Amino acid sequence: MNATLGPAIGATAFEVGAEVRAAFTEHAGEHIAEVESAFLPTIKGKATEKYRANLYQLARQRLTALGITRIFGGDFCTHTDAERFFSYRRDGRTGRMASLIYRID
C-alpha cells in the first residue's frame, strides 16, 4: 500500500501541550522512542510544558505500524508557506480546509 501526506503545519510551528504528547505516547507501545522524538520541548516550567510536534513523523510512524511502507509527501508547512497555504495559526482568521482519505483495493 501507498500513502501520500498532504500539506500540514510543520514541526517548527505546531506547538502543543503536554496532554497531546501524553495521548500519543500512551498508545505508542513498542514505538515509544520514535513517538517521543516527534515532540521537542519548547517551554518547561512549573505549570506549563509545551512541545513542538512533528505531525509528519507521527503520521509516518502510524502508517508504518499499519504495514504501509511506501509513504510520500510531508514536505510542506502550511504555517510558513503563506504563498500557497491558508493557516489560521498564522493569519488569525478562518477559512476552509479539507482532508481526504481514500483507499483503492
Image (spheres, rainbow, N blue to C red):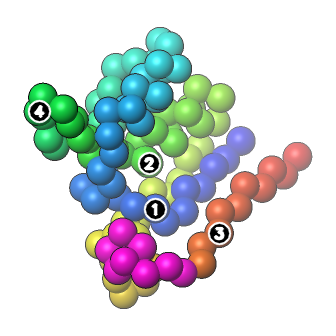
Can the viewer see residue 68 in this picture? yes
Q: Secondary structure at mark 2?
A: helix
| Residue 26, horizontal then vertical, whole percent | 47, 19
- How far apart marks 1 and 3 lie (CA) works out to 11 Å
Q: Which residue is mark 3?
A: 98
Labels 1 & 3 near each other (Cβ < 8 A): no
Q: CA distance from mark 1 to mark 4?
A: 28 Å
Q: Which mark is residue 45?
A: 4
Residue located 64% across and 36% down the image: 68
**Above or below, 6 relative to 40:** below
Per the image, label 3 sits on a secondary structure element best described as: loop
Q: Which residue is mark 1?
A: 8
Residue on which the image places disc 2: 56
Residue type at mark 2?
Answer: Tyr
**Would you say the residues marked 1 and 4 are in contact, meaning their CB atoms lie under 8 Å apart?**
no
Q: Furthest residue to the bottom?
A: 83
Q: Amino acid at mark 3?
A: Ala
Q: Residues within 10 Å of mark 3 (few under 14, many from 20)?
A: few
- Name the residue nearer the viewer: 87 or 32: 87
- Badge 2: few (under 14), some or many (20 or more) residues near its Cα, within 10 Å? many
Quadrant in which the N terminus is drawn: top right
Residue 94 in the magenta stretch? The answer is yes
Q: CA distance from mark 2 to mark 3?
A: 17 Å
Residue depicted at 25% across the width and 55% down the height: 12
Q: Which residues are magenta?
A: 88-95
- Residue 50, given in percent of the width and then of the height, sits at 24, 41
Q: Secondary structure at mark 1?
A: loop
Kindly tell me whether residue 35 is visible in this rendering: no
